[in-house]
Image: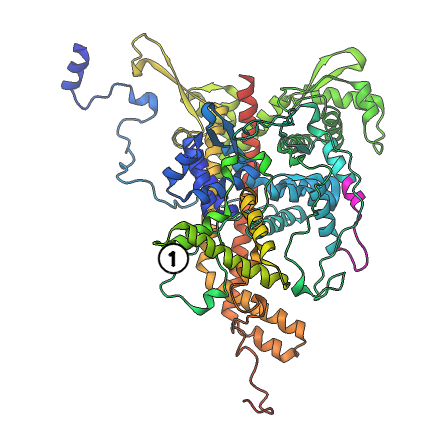
Amino acid sequence: MTQAEIKLCSLLLQEHFGEIVEKIGVHLIRTGSQPLRVIAHDTRTPLDQVKKALCVLIQHNLVIYQVHKRGVVEYEAQCSRVLRMLRYPRYIYTAKTLYSDTGELIVEELLLNGKMTMSAVVKKVADRLTETMEDGKTMDYVEVSNTFVRLADTHFVQRCPLVPATENSDPGPLPPAPNLVINEKDMYLVPKLSLIGKGKRRRSSDEDATGEPKAKRPKHTTDNKEPSPDDGIYWQANLDRFHQHFRDQAIVSAVANRMDQTSSEIVRTMLRMSEITTSSNAPFTQPLSSNEIFRSLPVGYNISKQVLDQYLTLLADDPLEFVGKSGDSGGGMYVINLHKALGSLATATLESVVQERFGSRCARIFRLVLQKKHLEQKQVEDFAMIPAKEAKDMLYKMLSENFMSLQEIPKTPDHAPSRTFYLYTVNILSAARMLLHKCYKSVANLIERRQFETKENKRLLEKSQRVEAIITSMQATGAEEDQLQEIEEMITAPERQQLETLKRNVSKLDACEIQVDETIFLLESYTESTMKRQ
Amino acid sequence: MASRSGGRGRGRGQLTFNMEAVGIGKGDALPPPTLQPSPLFPPLEFRPVPLPSGEEGEYVLALKQELRGAMRQLPYFIRPAVPKRDVERYSDKYQMSGPVDSAIDWNPDWRRLPRELKIRVRKIQKERTTILLPKRPLKTTEDKEETIQKLETLEKKEEEVTSEEDEEKEEEEEKEEEEEEEYDEEEHEEETDYIMSYFDNGEDFGADSDDNMDEAIY
């Protein structure tokens, strides 16, 4: 794990779970697999706090444990999973676009709580939806369950590994930690529950539904004493499936930008057909015949078979090679080259970064070297039609930033520098890795700056929160207009200005983080796909 | 090896390669040497592209900020223990700012977690009492704890309980050491004499306008 990744993980953990969890998590990421006592000793935190932190981390799938010989349990942190926390808003928004508000809330609850049982999720989501509905209307559990089942069928949520059921009735000494297993087939199996009920609205008055005064109600949680029928079956959000969806979205929009709407629809249809048949790591999808594609096109699209064939031929001949032709049976067998598509997307990202950082002339040189693979300095000047001095300057700038690299080709066995060719080349994988590292650093910087801004204005923020609380309480008791006016004037105009500026800056920094995360996703997908192929 | 060291000794100004091949012509001014690390915030040559705005961007932004706030309120956010202030203040009793003890606020499924991660709540109470009375043996402090608990259970139930039932309850509580998950918050709250929600911090005092001089102020 690079220093930049560790720093980013530390900031994310601190923001979402507090300092204690951050200390333990970062220690585990740095040192690898360790048992409980060693963690407590090395981080110099009390044992109870370490236990609490580990419980939280395991609940959120950020740390896994393993039982080694002699009953020692070792804990290991998953750094890449911690970095996913940056992407939570995007997952929730995707669920909203696919399955509307119900799906959005289900995924949100699963992400916030790590893992939950289906009945718990359904109850909570129904309650939350009921809050937002008008008075008198409630959300039925059945509707929420249906959406949950649809999410499971399309693999967006999956079951967590289960505790194995003990066969013998009288087990000996319990193992120090359960050995969790999951069967591939059962991962998306929804238990048969008959959840009947409606969402409950949280009452703000003093009396609840049964009429008991609030003070005497016992402070127990609303769990029933008997276990729910799906006790022990926990669900979590399947992040890989979301990543597959993002990748498909990126490919479709790339095709739409390059060609037109119809071709992007064709590619979208092909991707949808291969969702279940192709694993997310495959370099290309299963071959699809032109007839199948024609039958599966969305209903609104009435293009004739010949037009479809023409589009497919165009797509297959495109130099970007998103779509490839793998055979002629069935009217032509076509595949989508996922790996090549990811490579093109990563290359486009690199080109765009070079253009924005160094200027369009540098971008021209970069694209030239990409196209011709290896070029000498003299050749670069000739092909790009840029004066020698400027070309040299730009090449060195890109070289120093590691976008380009030098390839030495010796003429003589003694590798004398005066008798060696130096060729400029772009190694996409290493440039992508370098850019990914820069992205992690940028996000860490953005979060730090945002925290700094918030801390600078902490006093002002607290004051404004207090004023708002006073105003709402006064409005509840029915105050007059001029009294409210006077309370509002407690915050002076320049302070209001300061608050506005703070809010704008924080929003801008947040939006930057989201934007950088999109780039991180593209580059990570490309590097992972390349590593798997090697 | 001899030729290498020979080359180093003679003709120090000569380079090993042909400068023109690299592109530096004869007599060209070389850039000045860098004597310090590059500046922390180098000036930008090109302004960055504006951020994407629009419905989707704004929605995701709002989601992100909401999530951040929501996660701070969840029980998974573990606040560090409040450091002891120099003087004990009266309001400390009414402002529970830090975690009450080391128990977890939420109920994980203990069957899925290693056994060693379970925290026993009783231990804390014992430790507390042992700190106060270090000289007395543990047994008498246990009795004291039990009597205090006995009194409090009496207060809570508001029933007349016979001493036999009390002893049975205590025995049950001792047996259920492993299941001391459900830490009774009420018990702890009852330590103070007054109900928490009734306490008024006094921050709103004086916020109301004093303009209405018609009524006499006592």
Q: Residue furthest left?
A: B9
Residue B93's x, y, as percent?
A: 48, 65
Residue type for callout 1? Leu
Q: Is residue A283 left or right of residue A13?
A: right
In the displayed structure, A493 sits above or below B18; it is: below
Does residue A8 show up?
no
Protein image colouring: rainbow
Identify the main secondary structure in magenta: loop
Residue A209 image point, x, y percent: 76, 61
In the picture, residue A521 is in which quadrant?
top right
Residue B120 painted magenta: no
How many residues crowd mark 1 within 10 Å: few (<14), some (14–19), many (20+)? few
Element type where label 1 sits in the image: helix
In the image shown, does A180 or A137 lie closer to the viewer? A180
- Bounds of the magenta segment: A133-145
Instruction: Judge by depth and name the residue closer to the eye, A244 or B176.
Output: B176
Does the stretch in magenta take in A138?
yes
- Extreme residue toward the top, this view: A413
Q: Residue at x 26, y 29 (%)?
A: B27
Q: Output the chain of dot 1.
A: B
Who is closer to the viewer here, A473 or A534?
Answer: A473
Residue labelled with disc 1: B132
**Residue A150 in the figure: left or right of residue A525:** right
x and y percentages locating residue A215 in the rendered image: 65, 65
Q: Quadrant of residue A324?
A: top right
Q: How many marks?
A: 1
Q: Is residue A48 visible?
A: yes
Q: Is residue B55 above or below residue A328?
A: below
- Report the quarter where the N terminus of chain A lies: top left
Residue visible at 70% across and 26% down in the picture: A186
